[in-house]
Image (spheres, grey):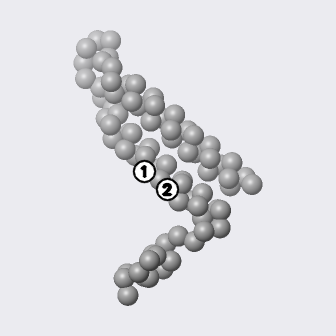
Amino acid sequence: MASWIITLSVITALTGMIVFANRKMGGMRKDGRPNQVPWGLVMVMCVLGIFIAFVHAINLAGFETGPEHGLLGRFGR
């Protein structure tokens, strides 16, 4: 049960970080200089983290993922 709570809280935190980065990316700094943090890259990394956490949640649900369980088998053999 703890693994589900951790996985879902990671997904929620990364979703919140995407919203925060989107707000920061759209605005200018008060002094007019460009942002020092690449907020677009932060958003892409958060989406990658959400994808990994989602696949982990699928594994927790009992479904097997990975290349050996794919449609064509491991490496398409």
Q: Give the residue type that dot 1 points to.
A: Leu
Q: Quadrant of residue 46?
A: top left
Q: Secondary structure at mark 2?
A: helix
Residue 28 percent location from the top left of the image: 30, 18
Tag 1 secondary structure? helix
Q: Residue furthest bottom?
A: 77
Report the residue marked by disc 2. Answer: 52
| Residue 8 position (above or below residue 31) | below
Tell me where residue 22 appears, x and y as whole percent: 39, 30
Q: Residue furthest right?
A: 1
Residue 12, image quadrant: top right
| Disc 2 to disc 1, C-alpha distance | 6 Å
Q: Which mark, by number, is residue 4? A: none
Q: Position of residue 72 (x, y in %)?
A: 41, 81
Q: Residues within 10 Å of mark 1 (few under 14, many from 20)?
A: few
CB within 8 Å, label 2 to label 1: yes
Q: Nearer the viewer, residue 20 or 31?
A: 20
User: From the image, which quarter does the C terminus lie in?
Assistant: bottom left
Q: Residue at x 32, y 17 (%)?
A: 29
In the displayed structure image, the side of residue 17 where residue 10 appears, left or right? right
User: Left or right: 55 with respect to 27?
Assistant: right
Q: From the viewer's side, name the closer residue of 51 and 41.
A: 51
Which residue is at a point 38% across and 25% down the rendered structure image?
24
**The disc labelled 2 sits on which kind of residue?**
Ile
- Provide the residue designation for mark 1: 48
In percent of the image, x 44 and y 36: which residue is there?
Answer: 18
Q: Quadrant of the N terminus?
A: bottom right
Question: Residue drawn 44% across and 77% down?
Answer: 71
